[in-house]
Image: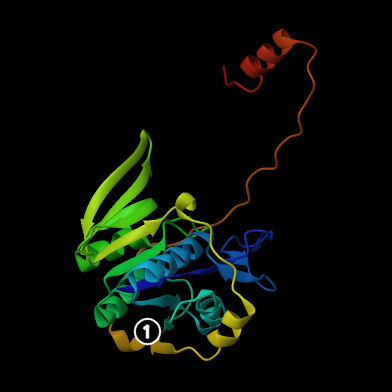
């Protein structure tokens, strides 16, 4: 089974980023970039499927050349090879999905895995748009992925408001991963050494004939308001009064 796993480099969630003075974006100077945590779960799931079903795992990234470091991390986890569609920064979700579709059409995988959303912009759009472009079935927010005996269909358990929902999708399909799907492995030292020699194919985005003009424009970013400190109350009656009259939540 050939599996493409799409990953996105994002600022380390453990580091605090600052907004530019003009509100046009965030300052990423000296901020460590990592694999988006949801994408890392997708990499782990691809590797587990390969270990059971056989085949190969191909990492796919759309973005600038700086993303090679995160690609090598995914290769060190155990992926077989990688593709970087080299583009400029600042693509919107539609443009990313268009570039991905070109790579997917060339590779003809049985399955495409990706994180349900990126933790930097939280758009939760690329998987759904990619499925629409390719006219492939999709299963989003996956917490469990299984394959039927003939290997031509997948049963995907997904989290919904009312509990769990299991759907069946024919392959090839797009599956986006949720937090409880698995626990990603760490890259071993031998894996890190092997990753340096694994194939990383760079495709210039300009060669794919994609209209990457943004359809979404960022107007401004603002930091959330600082939370006020808590306060003590003498009794339950005072607490209820403050919740009703000051917080306006009752």
Q: Quadrant of residue 60?
A: bottom left
Q: Nearer the viewer, residue 52 or 72?
A: 52
Q: Nearer the viewer, residue 53 or 74?
A: 53
Q: Is residue 37 visible?
A: yes
Label 1: few (<14), some or many (≥20) within 10 Å?
A: some
Q: In the image, residue 240 lies at what x, y percent?
A: 66, 13
Q: In the image, residue 229 lies at what x, y percent?
A: 76, 33
Q: Residue at x 55, y 86 (%)?
A: 194
Q: In the image, residue 108 lies at what x, y percent?
A: 25, 78
Q: Is residue 83 left or right of residue 102?
A: right
Q: Residue at x 38, y 36 (%)?
A: 161
Q: Residue at x 64, y 23 (%)?
A: 247
Examine the rendered structure and indicate whether residue 46 appears above or below residue 139.
below
Q: Nearer the viewer, residue 185 or 213?
A: 185
Q: Residue furthest bottom?
A: 197
Q: Is residue 81 left or right of residue 188?
A: left
Q: Quadrant of residue 92?
A: bottom left
Q: Is residue 86 visible?
A: no
| Residue at the spot of label 1 | 205
Q: Nearer the viewer, residue 97 or 39?
A: 39
């Amino acid at each position: 089974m050939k599996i493409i796993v799409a990953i996105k480099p994002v600022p380390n969630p453990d580091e605090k980023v600052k907004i530019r003075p003009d509100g046009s974006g965030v300052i990423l100077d000296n901020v460590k970039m990592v694999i988006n945590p949801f994408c890392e779960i997708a990499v782990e799931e691809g590797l587990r499927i390969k270990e059971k079903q056989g085949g190969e795992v191909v990492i796919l990234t759309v973005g600038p050349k700086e993303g090679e470091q995160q690609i090598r991390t995914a290769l060190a986890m155990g992926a077989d090879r990688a593709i970087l569609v080299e583009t400029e920064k600042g693509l919107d979700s539609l443009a990313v999905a268009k570039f991905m579709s070109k790579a997917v059409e060339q590779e003809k995988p049985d399955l495409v895995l990706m994180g349900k959303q990126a933790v930097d912009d939280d758009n939760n759009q690329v998987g759904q748009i990619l499925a629409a472009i390719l006219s492939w079935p999709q299963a989003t927010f996956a917490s469990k992925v299984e394959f039927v005996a003939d290997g031509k269909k997948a049963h995907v358990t997904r989290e919904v408001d009312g509990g769990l929902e299991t759907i069946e999708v024919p392959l090839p399909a797009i599956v986006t991963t949720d937090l409880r799907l698995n626990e990603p492995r760490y890259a071993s030292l031998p894996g890190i050494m092997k990753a340096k020699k694994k194939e990383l194919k760079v495709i210039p985005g300009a060669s794919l004939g994609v209209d990457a003009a943004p359809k979404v424009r960022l107007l401004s970013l603002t930091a959330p308001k600082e939370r006020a400190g808590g306060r003590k109350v003498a009794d339950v009656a005072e607490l209820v009064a403050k919740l009703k009259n000051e917080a306006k939540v009752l």
